[in-house]
Image (spheres, grey):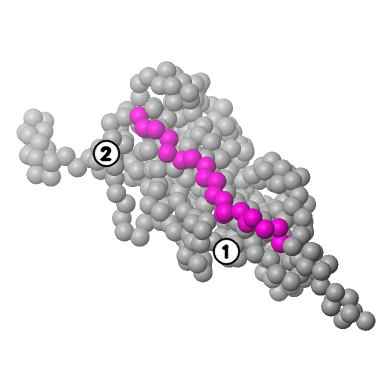
Amino acid sequence: MLAKLCKKAFPKSLWVYHCNSGACNGCDIEILNILTPYYDVERFGIKVVASPRHADVMLLSGAVTRPTFPLVKKAFAAMPEPKLVFGVGSCAFGGGCWFDTYHVSGGGATAVPVNYYIPGCPPRPEAIIYGVALALGLVDKKAVPIDLKQVEFPIDAYERNKAWEDRNVIYELLKH
Amino acid sequence: MWLTSKIKQILLVLKPGVVTLKYPFEPRPVAKDFRGQPAWDHHKCVGCGGCAAHCPARTIMIRDLCQELRAMVYDGTRCTYCGRCADVCPEDAIAMTEQYELATDDGNDITVRLELFMLTCRRCGRCYNMETTNLIDKMGLKGFRYDQLEMRAVIPRATERFEAKALEESDRYKRPQT
């Protein structure tokens, strides 16, 4: 549904504002990598702009640290509607290794409403292109939650043990 | 002048041809030894908790639902795909797959949940209660077993009987927010 809405809201080119909120530059280098001729993302009409006032999409990289927290909020408020936020990397997704430290707010979702997440540390350039293509409705979503279960044991060990102890009179004799 | 430079450019470009990948419309294989999303083999897993203790981002949480039942939850939102869980696993139950197309609009989409049957002592039925008795295991596991202090409050220790309430509470557990 969100993909359909994106198609309607952004019929032409997406202009992207790249916002680094305390990332280690791994994700930033991969974001620059997808603009090279090899992974040419401009064929989808995507262009990196310098100001959030020109942008449709915010590419948020990095766990939002405490100094950048108000700045990220300000940059998001400066973007014109309709707007999207992409969280690039594990830090923008759930906070990375620093999800519970004192100087990190724990992921991009704490500061701004993130629409799409691209996990990876850093994500491959293909993974970022996949995320953008997912938002544009070009590909299907592949990630699904997995629920695994071992075969349940048919015997209740406690009841069997209790019955065995009740039967075994030698325990009572050994106690004295 | 500009025309000659353009012709020069065209001649230069003719040699390499088109280099741009048609990625989203064509599959792109990964390099050898690429570490993508970790995959669990629940038939091999013994539930030792080594992966949970080694994970730098603490993505793997262990919850003891009762003596026999241990739930392990892999929360992929902050996974850095370092592969230490696959390295440390004594049973080779974790393998790093080549799946990297994990972009999603919902954080719960890359969660893996395992429910393991833990074998208990045949005699007393509760010898593996490391949480309360074995001090060395207690020291090693205390920081890593549960994600947060609130998590410990939900399931403080393994119970002898299965508690449906504990399962329900742990299912409602939300990922850490500030």
The residue carrying pointer 2 sits among few (fewer than 14), some (14 to 19) or many (20 or more) residues within 10 Å by Cα, namely: few
Start and end of the magenta stretch?
A138-158
Foreground mark, 2 or 1, reads 1
Mark 1 residue crowding within 10 angstroms, few (<14) / some (14–19) / many (20+): some
- The residue shown at (43%, 22%) is A4
SS majority, magenta: loop
> Which label number is shown at residue B46?
1
Mark 2 and 1 residues: CB-CB less than 8 Å, in contact?
no
Q: Where is mark 2, residue-wise? A: B26
* Marks 2 and 1 share the same chain: yes
The three-letter amino acid code for the residue at tag 2 is Glu
Relative image position of residue A59 (x, y in whole percent)? 46, 37
* Residue B130 placement (x, y as % from top left): 72, 68
Quarter of the picture holding the C terminus of chain B? top right
- Give the residue type that dot 1 points to: Val
In the image, residue B13 sits, relative to residue B153, either above or below, namely: above
* B174 w.r.t. B60: above or below: above
Note whether B112 is above or below A72 in the view shown: below
Classify residue B63 by image quadrant.
bottom right
